[in-house]
Image (tube, rainbow, N blue to C red):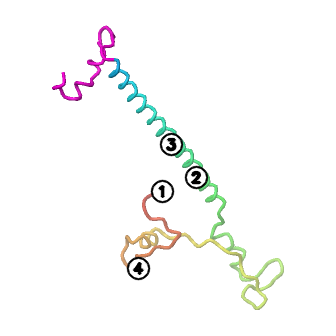
């Protein structure tokens, strides 16, 4: 028995009789059950962590979608400030008493500009602007 490999020394067939379910080695049987329970507990921790991470990811995705929908377009002020004067009070935006136009979002990069900003198009590549996400299609 001691000359057998460990996989056979601690196998199920040595712990109890498979056909009659009579326990042959109670200590080995308890050790196998404890090992199985430990593996199940470890798995439950992992599952709980995965569920928490998935929920957090769903919340972040919903938040990002809300932010994207609420973000002001770069074209929002084109009509209002494109003519050069205020239609409400007639003041010129380029003159001395002009009010500056409100802050705007920058125009989105074209496909070619975003590829070059990520370093894929040669030319000016290198450091990319903070608004460009490189690393996949998302």
Against 115, residue 63 (above or below) is: above
Number of residues whose C-alpha sits closer than 10 Å to that of mark 2, classed few (under 14), some (14–19) or many (20 or more): few
Which label sits in the foreground, 1 or 3? 3
Which label sits in the foreground, 3 or 2? 3
State the residue position of label 2: 60
In which quadrant of the rendered image does the N terminus lie?
top left
Distance, label 1 to label 2, CA atoms, is 14 Å
Q: Secondary structure at mark 2?
A: helix
Q: How many numbered discs sit on the rendered protein?
A: 4
Q: Earlier in the sequence, mark 1 or mark 2?
A: 2
State the residue position of label 4: 124
Furthest residue in direction left, as rendered: 3
Q: Which mark is residue 49?
A: 3
Q: On the rendered structure, is 70 left or right of 16?
A: right
Distance, label 3 to label 4, CA atoms, is 43 Å
Distance, label 1 to label 4, CA atoms, is 24 Å
Which label sits in the foreground, 3 or 4? 3
Distance, label 3 to label 2, CA atoms, is 16 Å
The segment highlighted magenta reads 1-25
- 56 or 108, nearer to the observer: 56
Q: Main secondary structure of the magenta part?
A: loop
Q: Earlier in the sequence, mark 3 or mark 4?
A: 3
Which residue is found at the position 61% from the left and 59% from the top? 68
Asked whether the residues under the numbered discs 2 and 4 touch, taking CB atoms below 8 Å apart as contact, a structural biologist would say no
Against 61, residue 97 (above or below) is: below
Q: Earlier in the sequence, mark 2 or mark 4?
A: 2
């Amino acid at each position: 028995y001691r000359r057998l490999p460990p996989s056979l020394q601690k196998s199920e067939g040595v712990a109890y009789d498979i056909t009659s379910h009579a326990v042959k080695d109670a200590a080995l049987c308890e050790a196998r059950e404890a090992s199985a329970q430990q593996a199940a507990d470890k798995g439950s921790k992992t599952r709980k962590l995965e569920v928490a991470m998935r929920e957090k990811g769903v919340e972040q995705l919903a938040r990002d979608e809300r932010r994207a929908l609420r973000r002001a377009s770069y074209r929002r002020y084109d009509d209002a400030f494109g003519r050069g004067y205020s239609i409400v009070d007639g003041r010129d935006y380029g003159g001395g008493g002009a009010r500056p136009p409100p802050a705007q979002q920058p125009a989105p990069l074209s496909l070619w500009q975003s590829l070059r900003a990520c370093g894929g198009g040669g030319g000016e590549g290198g450091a990319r602007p903070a608004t460009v996400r490189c690393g996949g299609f998302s």
